[in-house]
Image (tube, rainbow, N blue to C red):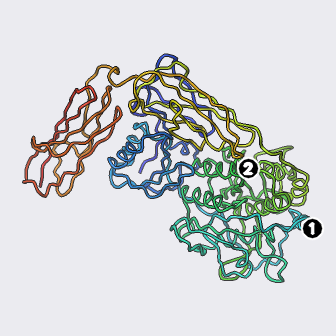
């Protein structure tokens, strides 16, 4: 299957592609707005590393616009023969299975629908481990990060939970069994979170193995409990969707620190959306930098910490990826940890540098549980031992994590109660605009901590909620009466502070005044003259400036079904059961009627075998 970054859609106007967190370009005139909303398509492929990453060839991850008509979306997915495999509602993500057909054509149809905000591939991720000598005899890396001094201040707290989103955890291991309080198997959607590949058991031991118990090893965070979240198949491979869902499950089950030792994630929009939700809700995601040993042109994202690995002599490990996205480094070679089957071993990789930092973050939170994630990040980065160029650099980030100094700074830090309301404004459309058809509503919302959601209302009636930035909605004006209307938005932060209402007055063009052109209809599949048998799905695209009303299907001139349709453009389909038809040529006709009574039709000849 070929890869592509779709740069143009089937829409009459030019579209602007942006990344999450970027501003939305406003090309709206004050007089008129009539557009199909911009859709972000495979934006992650702009990263050359992700562009070569394997992915599920018959799956797509899509995020519908908040406010998209649910009936129209359901119809669209049915017309395109797409099966919903999962719904990660916290980030508005649907995992879709493409049931036959050309994936590229499906992507184009989704993009042109005006219902979908972003489309992603479901990338597959490798765990970032490099196994090495078993039964390594010491844990020098704990001295390197000055963990023993930190333990004089705190050995953790049962109230601060560490989640390991990985291949599961060996629940019978003597150094882990009493630490695991719960878990979930995201991959199979059940409660069997036993380790299937070994990697999760290794990461869990580094972060929080049972300590001071006269056996095995010491974890960084002695007293912090563990959530075991399996997000991989039996070969230890995960996907964008599974990792994001694992992060969100961890947040929903009260994890404060969430370790994700997979790569490449530095440009992954789906995982970033989950990490942003975690950060905004009071949790911190820690991610391994990757073991490619290369310099990456990626900036990462501020809602997570990316951790590189040190080798010998406080020098970056040869296998550790580097770049502006790296925030911290920690020892990543000769890491003694837990193994499946009750064993212990020595491992290398950024996979084990990351849970070291996760453990330190848990210690800092344990000694000052009132801190917000931003203050924990500051405690970790401000106290790091600078190893490279002065200040943050692309090799070591802020430097080597220092557990003792991080804990000391956390003790001294304080976050005032959040009593400041967010600010919000509608950037598109402008006041006085005339709107027609599917129209994007773009909103800017900011807060001292984080915006929880933005609610859009039409004439004081709430119609949609967006929980992810950039905040954008879609409304179909043909579902409202023509004339003057007021759009308003209110933003709320995670402390419950609500903004003042931002409003714009607009005019919706009514269906009867939307003008003149006749409705149009064209068949999508099958092609003219195709030989068919059994049950055949016949698909067409219909549109009408005045608004759609009904679609009627005929077989050889005889009416067989009539359906109501809404909006100005839609995909429609008819399931033709050819077993009841004679062999030979048959004529399929579809007749479209708009809200003004105008009609158009198209005919398709098919051969029943």
Q: Is residue 392 above or below residue 188?
A: above
Q: Is residue 519 above or below residue 221?
A: above
Whether residues under marks 2 and 1 lie with C-beta atoms below 8 angstroms apart, the answer is: no
Q: Is residue 327 above or below residue 115?
A: below
Side (left or right) of 446 relative to 4: right
Q: Among all residues in the image, which is located at the extreme top?
A: 31
Viewer-side label of 2, 1: 1
Provide the secondary structure element on which disc 1 rests: loop
- Sequence-first tag of 2 and 1: 1
Q: How many residues crowd mark 1 within 10 Å: few (<14), some (14–19), many (20+)?
A: few
Instruction: Judge by depth and name the residue closer to the eye, 523 or 477.
Output: 477
Provide the secondary structure element on which disc 2 rests: loop
Find residue 128 and report its horizontal and vertical position in percent: 65, 62
Q: Which residue is mark 2?
A: 326
Q: Residue at x 18, y 47 (%)?
A: 530
Q: Which residue is mark 1?
A: 152
Side (left or right) of 320 relative to 4: right
Q: Residue at x 44, y 58 (%)?
A: 85
Which quadrant of the figure has residue 418?
Answer: top right
Q: Residue at x 57, y 35 (%)?
A: 18
Find residue 570 and report its horizontal and vertical position in percent: 33, 38
């Amino acid at each position: 299957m070929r890869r592509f970054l779709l740069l143009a859609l089937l829409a009459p106007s030019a579209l602007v592609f942006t990344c999450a967190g970027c501003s939305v370009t406003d090309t709206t005139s004050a007089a008129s707005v009539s557009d199909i909303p911009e859709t972000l398509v495979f934006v992650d492929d702009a990263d050359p590393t992700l562009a070569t990453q394997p992915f599920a060839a018959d799956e797509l991850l899509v995020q519908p616009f908040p406010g998209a008509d649910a009936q129209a979306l359901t119809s669209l997915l049915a017309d395109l023969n797409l099966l919903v495999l999962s719904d990660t509602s916290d980030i508005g993500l649907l995992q879709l299975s493409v049931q036959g057909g050309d994936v590229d054509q499906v992507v184009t149809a989704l993009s042109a629908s005006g219902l979908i905000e972003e489309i992603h591939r479901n990338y597959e991720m490798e765990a970032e481990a490099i196994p090495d000598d078993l039964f390594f005899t010491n844990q020098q890396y704990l001295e390197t990060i000055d963990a023993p001094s930190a333990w004089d201040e705190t050995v953790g707290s049962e109230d601060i939970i560490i989640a390991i989103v990985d291949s599961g955890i060996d629940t019978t291991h003597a150094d882990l069994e009493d630490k695991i309080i719960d878990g979930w198997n995201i991959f199979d959607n059940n409660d069997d979170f036993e380790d299937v590949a070994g990697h999760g058991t290794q990461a869990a031991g580094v972060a929080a193995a049972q300590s001071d118990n006269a056996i095995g090893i010491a974890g960084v965070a002695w007293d912090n409990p563990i959530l075991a979240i399996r997000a991989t198949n039996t070969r230890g491979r995960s996907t964008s969707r599974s990792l994001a869902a694992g992060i969100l499950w961890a947040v929903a089950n009260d994890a404060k620190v969430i370790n994700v030792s997979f790569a490449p994630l530095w440009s992954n929009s789906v995982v970033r959306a989950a990490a942003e939700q975690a950060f905004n809700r009071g949790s911190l995601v820690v991610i391994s930098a990757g073991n490619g040993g290369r310099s990456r042109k990626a900036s990462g994202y501020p809602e997570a910490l990316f951790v590189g690995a040190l080798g010998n002599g406080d020098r970056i490990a040869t296998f550790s990826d580097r770049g502006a996205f790296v925030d911290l480094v920690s020892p990543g070679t000769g890491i003694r940890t837990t193994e499946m089957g009750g064993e212990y071993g020595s491992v290398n990789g950024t996979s084990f540098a990351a849970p070291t930092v996760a453990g330190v973050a848990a210690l800092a939170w344990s000694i000052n549980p009132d801190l917000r994630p931003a203050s924990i990040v500051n405690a970790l980065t401000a106290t790091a031992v600078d190893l490279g160029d002065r200040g943050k650099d692309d090799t070591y980030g802020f430097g080597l994590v220092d557990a003792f100094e991080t804990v000391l700074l956390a003790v001294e830090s304080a976050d005032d109660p959040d009593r400041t309301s967010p600010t919000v404004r509608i950037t598109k459309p402008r006041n006085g605009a005339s709107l027609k058809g599917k129209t994007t509503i773009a909103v800017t919302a900011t807060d001292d901590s984080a915006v929880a959601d933005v609610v859009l209302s039409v004439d004081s009636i709430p119609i949609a909620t967006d929980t992810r930035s950039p905040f954008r909605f879609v409304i179909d004006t043909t579902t409202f009466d023509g004339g003057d209307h007021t759009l308003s938005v209110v933003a709320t932060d995670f402390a419950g502070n609500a903004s003042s209402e931002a409003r714009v007055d607009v005019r919706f063009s009514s269906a009867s005044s939307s003008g003149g052109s006749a409705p149009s209809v064209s068949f999508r599949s099958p092609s003219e003259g195709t030989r068919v048998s059994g049950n055949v799905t016949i698909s067409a695209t219909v549109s009408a400036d005045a608004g759609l009303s009904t679609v009627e299907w005929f077989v050889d001139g005889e009416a067989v079904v009539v359906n109501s349709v809404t909006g100005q453009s839609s995909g429609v389909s008819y399931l033709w059961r050819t077993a009841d038809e004679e062999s030979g040529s048959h004529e399929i006709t579809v007749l479209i009627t708009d809200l003004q009574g105008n009609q158009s039709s198209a005919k398709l000849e098919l051969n029943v075998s």
